[in-house]
Image (cartoon, rainbow, N blue to C red):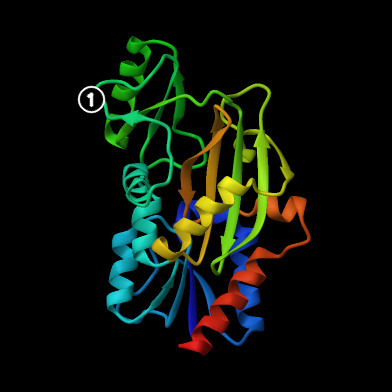
Amino acid sequence: MRCWILYEKEDLEQNRFFAERLRDSGKDLGFDAEIVTTDKMDFDDPADVVVSRIRDSETLSQLEDLGSTVYNRSSVCRICNDKSYTYSFVRSIGVPILPFSFPDQPLPEGPPWVVKSCVGHGGTEVFKAESIEEAQRICEDLKDRKPIIQRLSSDPGRDLRIYVLGGRIIASVMRSSETDFRANFKLGGKAELVEPPQDAESIVKKIIPELMPDFIGIDFVFGDGKVYLNEIEDAVGTRMLYNLTDLDPARMYMEYIAHSKISL
């Protein structure tokens, strides 16, 4: 069975370890697995299985229409890679999020505010605004990236990522930063394994049957003694899992996919 490990060309180099681990684990499990970038893929001869590490739901939808089984499917990609879609989805199922608005709407409580791109990832398009003028300037800078303005959590510099694989929680990591309101590991934040709070775990269990993901990270922020969903990572990074645990998420993911194909 042919299997593509699908990446954007520009993302592959910084994620090559995981890409190669997915490919090698797939081969061990009997897949004819290869790493393919979107600029080299052939829509006339798509693979039976596509392990998506891209953020383009339209490409994934085309592959599904051509008969490929995609992990995570295109609907997951669409919802998770645009925060406005994410927030609309989670609000529809009663999941708490911090108040937000778009540039042409009344601002949420503040300042300060978090101003971020709806389509950014990894914390690189997330900024803190201390005034209305600063929020407006950042929105203008992000005008082609669908900016959103959100109330800053009362406990900034700390967030929780819960990893979900095959419908179950496999790890929970608390990230923190003493120098930045963003706690992203890639931006220098510290990380430690923790037991997920019960209210966060309850939210995860509410999301899973509605979203039907294969492998995602669900991020939470904290404020006023409560947890709030911050975002859902589709092509979720695994550096923290390899650094903090004995888990091999690439192998686990391919084993899950192999089992899923056998069950079909």
Which residue is labeled 1 in the image? Answer: 105
Q: Residue furthest right?
A: 246
Is residue 237 at least partly visible in the picture?
no
Q: Nearer the viewer, residue 190 or 35?
A: 190
The correct choice, above or below, for 92 with respect to 170 in the image is: above
Given the image, on which type of amino acid does mark 1 rest?
A: Gln
The image position of residue 177, as x and y in percent, is 66, 28
- Image point (60%, 59%), residue name: 16
- Image point (25%, 21%), residue name: 106
The correct choice, above or below, for 111 with respect to 254 in the image is: above
Q: Quadrant of residue 163?
A: bottom right
The image position of residue 52, as x and y in percent, is 46, 65
Alpha-carbon neighbours of circle 1 within 10 Å: few (<14), some, or many (≥20)? few
The image position of residue 1, as x and y in percent, is 49, 88
Left or right: 251 as drawn, with respect to 221: right
- Image point (54%, 77%), residue name: 257
| Local SS, label 1 | loop
